[in-house]
Image: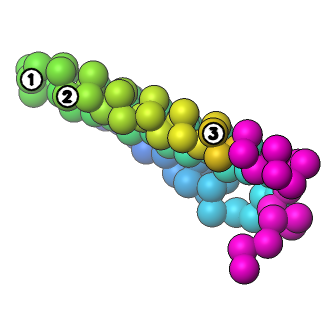
Amino acid sequence: MLNMSLIIIIMFMFGNMIFVSKHKHLLIVLMSLEFMVLSIFFLMLLYLMMINYNLYMLMVFMVFSVCEGALGLSILVSMIRTHGNDYFQSFNLI
């Protein structure tokens, strides 16, 4: 159990490092967010199985993560339609 939780925490840290570092594509940032959500899901699964609790909370978590993924993809499609690409350099925040 301890080795598995350590691997999951390392997965979360790698996703966090990719998210924080400067990337020029929005798709890479969105995939790193989904990777972090997946690692949090695995960590919650291990914890809830360890304390013998119902796994309905995981279903609620998955609903919110799917909504987050759909929102991110809609922002990506909107950005590609308005600007022609998903580069952060061509997207002016002002």
Res 30 visible? no
Q: Amino acid at mark 1?
A: Tyr
Q: Amino acid at mark 3?
A: Ser
The answer to whether 54 appears left or right of 43 in the picture is left
The way the protein has been coloured in the rendering is: rainbow
Marks 2 and 1, how far apart in space? 9 Å
Under circle 1, the secondary element is loop
Q: In this rendering, would 94 be left or right of 60?
A: right
Circle 2 crowding by C-alpha within 10 Å: few under 14, some 14–19, many from 20: few
**Mark toward the viewer: 1 or 3:** 3
Disc nearer the start of the sequence (1/3)? 1
The furthest residue to the bottom? 94
In the foreground, 69 or 94: 94
User: Quick check: marks 2 and 1 in contact, CB under 8 Å?
Assistant: yes
- In the displayed structure, 69 sits above or below 19; it is above
Q: Quadrant of residue 73?
A: top right
Residue 89: horizontal and vertical position, in percent? 86, 67
Q: Which residue is denoted by mark 2 in the rendering? A: 57
Q: Which residue is mark 3?
A: 74
- Residue beneath disc 1: 53
Closer to the camera in the image, 75 or 65: 75
- The range drawn in magenta is 77-94
Residue at point 76%, 50% (across, down): 79
Q: Find numbered disc 3 in the image and state the secondary structure of the residue it sits on.
A: helix
Towards the viewer: 81 or 9:
81
The local crowd at label 3, few if under 14, some if 14 to 19, many if 20 or more residues have their Cα within 10 Å, is: few
Secondary element under disc 2, as helix, strand or loop, is: helix
**Residue shown at 63%/55% (left/top)?**
19
Residues at discs 3 and 2 in contact (Cβ within 8 Å): no
For the C terminus, which image quadrant?
bottom right
